[in-house]
Image: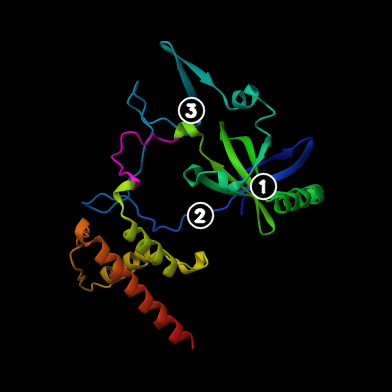
Amino acid sequence: MRAIWSGAISFGLVNIPVKVYSATESVKLDFDMLDKNDLSPIRYARISTGSDKEIPYQDIVKGYKWDDRYIIVENEDFEKASPEKTKTIEIVDFVDESEIDSILYEKPYYLEPDKTAQRPYALLRQALQKSKKVGIALFVFRNKQHIGVVKPSGDVVVLNQIRFTDQIRSTEELNLPMDKLSKGKELEMALALIEQSSSEFNPQKYKDEYSRALLEMIEKKAKGKPIKAGKAKQPKPTDNNQLMNMLKASLAKRKKERSQQKQIKK
């Protein structure tokens, strides 16, 4: 892995030099844009609106529009704005993780300690584990300030970048039902279905089945084999009067599946 940032994570007056690595990677199929006439790849050019000419990357600068003119901002200007913030992941608070709405989570990073920072890194990791708290940190990546959650995950300390609350859209314009619309018996049946379908979370059992099927289809096309596929059907909405019957049928189906799974294990 290649580090994308280096600096220090701090809590109180303790500074721990770290390197930051992206904790995720894309596994989607990579498609190129092609000219349909000769299948030549399409490239994207940076065209100036002033000259209609392509501009080399080294001649492109960043500008902020101020009134009717642009102010050029150089790379070093981003650091000059607040030097300490560009080099520090500062933990400013500790909270219970359960208090953080999952809608805020955005992107995870691994934090690796410098060779000289093994002891304070281990101390932070163990303190978070023992306290069962997570740290709320402020940091600057790629010329933009972010907020994040610092927590241990096994042996590594993870920085989960989260969204600021003003980035979350309001739900006021959505037409949402009230709880009183659901009936008591239906709720009991729904809870029973959830109970029958509950298990320990194992992320490894969930696979990207669509990408696998798509790749199989591409392989068939490459070999000149015919592609046969049924037409996708729109899921039929459950009628309000049939809700209880559908819940009962779902529960019975789930119980049967559970029984079959137990028999297979034996």
Residue 262 locus on image (x, y percent): 45, 83
- How many residues crowd around disc 2 within 10 Å: few (fewer than 14), some, or many (20 or more)? few
Residue 163 locus on image (x, y percent): 51, 38
Q: Mark 1 vs mark 2: which is more N-terminal? A: 2
Residue 133's tag is 1
Query: What amino acid is labelled 3 in the image?
Result: Asp
Q: What's the distance in space between the residues labelled 1 and 3, CA to CA? A: 48 Å
Name above or below for residue 258 compared with residue 130: below
Q: Which residue lies furthest to the bottom in this view?
A: 266
Query: What amino acid is labelled 1 in the image?
Result: Lys
Residue for point 31% across, 52% down: 182
Asked whether 89 or 218 is in front, the reply is: 89
Q: What's the distance in space between the residues labelled 2 and 3, CA to CA? A: 31 Å
Q: Name the residue under label 3.
A: 59
Asked whether 64 or 47 is in front, the reply is: 64
- How many residues crowd around disc 1 within 10 Å: few (fewer than 14), some, or many (20 or more)? some
Q: Residue furthest front?
A: 184
Q: Mark 2 vs mark 3: which is more N-terminal? A: 2
